[in-house]
Image (cartoon, helix red, strand yellow):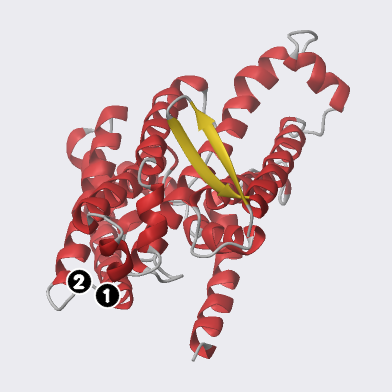
């Protein structure tokens, strides 16, 4: 398959032509859907009015630029972060079920947030620190338990599912022991929502996600080699332990950052890499199509959450759970049919 070489000074990257073409199509679809989402408020606004507001004219400037744009931007950036995190863990485990929400990282991040809410009062910094600490702790437990009898993608996924179940039980216990108002807030936050986000809440998470995306991009060559197997990666000069540590930290950071702001949004990280791989026709689960697919999926889910029961706005996590449940069923059936 032909490839394109992208150069920026001394830095260069190779990308397959079909991957580049499909990524461009996904970007265009995301931009179109983003414009549609900007038209969605309590009612559907005319496109001309939205274009005027984007140019700083008309009566809808405040509504569009300060209320709707942060939500649309959050859906795109957070969806891309979840898609990239899913790609990282599915490449590390070499298993389509190896995503943060399946192997316990979302549950671990939620545990950290619950501790921050119930013990430290739930400040923005506390939520972020708790989410990151909980996600890293869950990842460390899963990784260490998987190493005891030799690292295997399937073993890591199975252990991750068990850790996820235990953490879910711990989270339920924390909520039951909390005061009523704290328990209600924590339960609502667990649904995963983009409702009410503003620029002040998303600027720092956007910056963190950008840094982590650059970190994972530096490991793209190693990720491609590791997808071919540990022996091939080692003979091509990949330091496997360092590579795994770097990408796992990046993946946990991406997941925890999203979770700290919007709550756990499940199944995007599971579905986006596999859909992106099929769209791009690529081997493995390349990060760019996965990230773009994740952005498109989360934005579409959030638009559906605003529309299905309008004027009532559902948490976007409800929509992704419904869609993801069907996808997970299909994926499990396909995995069982594999020889």
Nearer-N-terminus badge (1/2): 2
The spot of residue 181 in percent (x, y) is 34, 42
Q: Which mark is residue 152?
A: 1
Which residue is nearer to you in this view: 85 or 108? 85
Name the residue at 45% across, 40% down: 262
Name the residue at 76% across, 15% down: 53
Instruction: State whether residue 16 is above or below residue 76.
Output: below
82 horizontally vs 225: left or right: right
Which residue is outermost to the left? 148
Instruction: Please tell me how crowded label 1 is: few (under 14), some (14-19), or many (20+) other residues with Cα within 10 Å.
Output: some
Q: Which residue is mark 2?
A: 146
User: Which one is closest to the eye, mark 1 or mark 2?
Assistant: 1
The spot of residue 313 in percent (x, y) is 63, 43
Q: CA distance from mark 1 to mark 2?
A: 7 Å
For the question of whether residue 100 can be seen, the reply is no
Q: Dot 1: what SS? A: loop
Instruction: Please tell me how crowded label 2 is: few (under 14), some (14-19), or many (20+) other residues with Cα within 10 Å.
Output: many
Confirm or deny contact between disc 1 and disc 2 (CB under 8 A).
Answer: yes
152 horizontally vs 257: left or right: left
Q: Dot 2: what SS? A: helix
Which residue is nearer to you in this view: 242 or 298? 242
């Amino acid at each position: 398959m032909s490839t394109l070489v992208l150069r920026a000074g001394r830095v260069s990257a190779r990308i397959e032509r079909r991957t580049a073409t499909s990524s461009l199509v996904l970007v265009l679809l995301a931009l179109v859907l983003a414009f549609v989402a900007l038209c969605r408020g309590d009612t559907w606004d005319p496109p001309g009015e939205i274009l005027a507001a984007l140019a700083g004219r008309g009566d809808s400037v405040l509504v569009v630029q300060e209320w709707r744009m942060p939500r649309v931007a959050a859906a795109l950036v957070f969806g891309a972060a979840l898609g990239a995190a899913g790609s990282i863990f599915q490449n590390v485990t070499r298993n389509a079920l190896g995503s943060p929400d399946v192997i316990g990282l979302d549950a671990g991040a939620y545990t950290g947030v619950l501790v921050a809410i119930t013990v430290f009062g739930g400040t923005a910094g506390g939520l972020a620190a708790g989410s990151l600490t909980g996600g890293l702790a869950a990842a460390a437990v899963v990784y260490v338990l998987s190493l005891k009898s030799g690292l295997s993608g399937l073993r890591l996924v199975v252990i991750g599912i068990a850790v996820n179940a235990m953490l879910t039980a711990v989270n339920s216990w924390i909520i039951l022991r909390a005061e009523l108002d704290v328990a209600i807030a924590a339960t609502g936050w667990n649904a995963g929502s983009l409702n009410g986000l503003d620029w002040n809440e998303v600027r720092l998470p956007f910056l963190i996600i950008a840094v982590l995306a650059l970190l994972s991009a530096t490991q793209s060559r190693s990720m491609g080699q590791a997808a071919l197997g540990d022996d091939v990666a080692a003979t091509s000069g990949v330091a496997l332990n360092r590579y795994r540590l770097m990408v796992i930290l990046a993946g946990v950071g991406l997941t925890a950052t999203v979770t700290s702001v919007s709550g756990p949004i499940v199944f995007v990280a599971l579905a986006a890499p596999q859909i992106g791989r099929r769209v791009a026709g690529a081997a493995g689960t390349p990060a760019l199509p996965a990230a773009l697919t994740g952005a498109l999926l989360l934005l579409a889910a959030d638009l559906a959450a605003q529309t299905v029961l309008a004027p009532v706005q559902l948490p976007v996590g409800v929509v992704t759970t419904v869609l993801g449940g069907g996808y997970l069923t299909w994926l499990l059936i396909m995995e069982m049919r594999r020889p």
